[in-house]
Image (cartoon, rainbow, N blue to C red):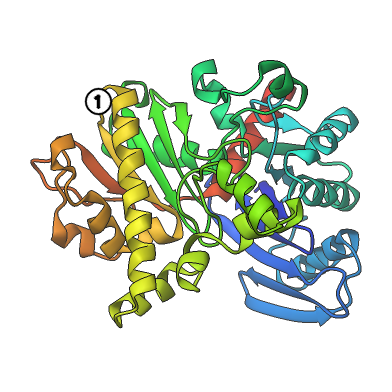
């Protein structure tokens, strides 16, 4: 058997998953964390169960050695499951990368050059790529970009109405994110319904700690809520989403907030956390149930924003065939789904309360039989999508 190792690298940790190339089943997964701290930690889930270790992990290269040790000790054997590819999640591909790309020295230079667009992510993604290449020097490495799926946006969708020369010089435009999830979910929805992807007009709502909406026409992204950065759009756990830009000018002048202060405010102290003091939707809902007015308002703002995007994207698409909820909140919060869809009968959406309340890890319909729009819950699987795209890139390069 052969496999693909999927890696999602952060600045002080990385997640990994080993996926069978043929069956697409997960063979093992794990987490290496606290890289660079006094004591690192590894967790490996394989055929022999879950194992954990605490050890010094000064950098990502040592982290990959620890991962290899875990595979050797706990399985599955990488000798018996040789790697077809190592697939890497890379957050920002700018407008340069629109498909999965085999990593070369030039690709590494480009990922590094795009780091000013994603300073918290691209450097960490690149560090993981370089460490993984040391661990697997004879295996092709593939970069799969969060932004790539949205490269099909039309100019009127990705262009901001600011000075055109300034925007071009500093690469200011809408890029969109969560593309791997939106691609996987929209394609899975079509397959689940047994309908041709090219005929469907869909909205995908990826609702987790980070959240985004995407309008998908015939399998192509035509609009998405995140912009130049993952800050724009929906209300998120700690991120504000849409905001009048003059708010920043006002706060800089009146509250004497610096650029770094504003960055901290909008990315880490806003969203659900800023509104209610709680960044997790489950905690917000529990607090609202106890009569906490701030938590109740946070829910109302979240729902209002989601309705706004559903209506806008339906207008852009011209009609809506499928609306899908995915990611942690979208898949598990039946109450939020009901709140979002309440009152959208005018768009042809009718929810079946019993179906919506059913808990499952499988794709499922939650709309009523007479709903003009099919509403689904589809669990996302970004690791599987990265595995598929990595194989596609390698086979395309080798003619296999």
Q: Position of residue 260 (x, y in %)?
A: 75, 55
In percent of the image, x 22 and y 59: which residue is there?
356
Q: In the picture provided, is 125 more to the left or to the right than 180?
A: right
User: In which quadrant of the rendered view does residue 178 lie?
Assistant: top right
In percent of the image, x 36 and y 56: which residue is there?
301
Q: In the picture provided, is 380 more to the left or to the right than 165?
A: left
> Can residue 227 be spotted in the picture?
yes
Above or below: residue 16 compared with residue 234: below
Q: Residue furthest left?
A: 370
Q: Position of residue 224 (x, y in %)?
A: 47, 34
Q: In the picture provided, is 270 more to the left or to the right than 109?
A: left
Residue, disc 1: 319
Residue in front for this viewpoint, 228 or 142: 228
Q: Secondary structure at mark 1?
A: loop
In percent of the image, x 79 and y 52: which residue is there?
124
Above or below: residue 340 compared with residue 318: below
> Can residue 18 be spotted in the picture?
no
User: How many residues crowd mark 1 within 10 Å: few (<14), some (14–19), many (20+)?
Assistant: some
Q: Position of residue 161 (x, y in %)?
A: 56, 23
Residue in front for this viewpoint, 253 or 362: 253
């Amino acid at each position: 058997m052969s496999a693909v190792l999927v890696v999602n690298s952060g600045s002080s940790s990385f997640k990994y998953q080993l996926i069978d190339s043929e069956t697409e089943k997960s063979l093992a997964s794990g987490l290496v964390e606290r890289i660079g701290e006094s004591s690192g930690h590894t967790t490996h889930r394989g055929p022999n169960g879950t194992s954990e270790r605490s050890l010094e992990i000064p950098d990502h290269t040592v982290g990959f050695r620890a991962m290899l040790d875990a595979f050797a000790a706990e399985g599955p054997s990488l000798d018996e499951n040789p790697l077809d590819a190592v697939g890497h999640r890379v957050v920002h591909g700018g407008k340069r990368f629109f498909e999965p790309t085999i990593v070369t020295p030039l690709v590494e230079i480009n990922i590094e050059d795009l780091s000013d667009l994603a300073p918290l992510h691209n450097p960490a993604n690149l560090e993981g790529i370089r460490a993984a290449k040391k661990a697997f020097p004879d295996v092709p490495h593939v970069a799969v970009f969060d932004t790539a799926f949205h490269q099909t946006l039309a100019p009127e969708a990705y262009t901001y109405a600011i000075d055109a020369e300034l925007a071009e010089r500093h690469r200011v435009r809408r890029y969109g994110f969560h593309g791997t999830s939106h691609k996987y979910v929209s394609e899975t929805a079509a397959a689940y319904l047994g309908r041709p992807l090219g005929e469907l007009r869909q909205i995908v709502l990826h609702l987790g700690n980070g959240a985004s909406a995407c309008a998908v026409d015939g399998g192509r992204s035509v609009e998405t809520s995140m912009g130049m950065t993952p800050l724009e759009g929906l209300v998120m756990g700690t991120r504000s989403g849409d905001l009048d830009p003059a708010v920043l000018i006002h706060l800089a002048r009146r509250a004497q907030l610096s650029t770094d202060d504003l960055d901290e405010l909008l990315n880490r102290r806003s969203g659900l956390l800023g509104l209610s003091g709680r960044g997790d939707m489950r905690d917000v809902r529990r607090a609202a149930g106890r009569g906490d007015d701030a938590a109740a308002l946070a829910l109302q703002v979240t729902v209002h924003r989601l309705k706004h995007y559903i209506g806008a994207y339906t207008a852009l698409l011209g009609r809506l065939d499928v609306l899908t909820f995915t990611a942690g909140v979208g898949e598990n919060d039946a109450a939020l789904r009901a709140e979002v869809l309440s009152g959208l009968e005018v768009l042809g959406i009718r929810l079946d309360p019993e179906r919506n309340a059913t808990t499952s890890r499988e794709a499922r319909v939650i709309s009523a039989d007479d709903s003009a729009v099919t509403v689904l819950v589809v669990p996302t699987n970004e690791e599987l999508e990265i595995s598929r795209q990595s194989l596609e890139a390698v086979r395309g390069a080798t003619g296999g």
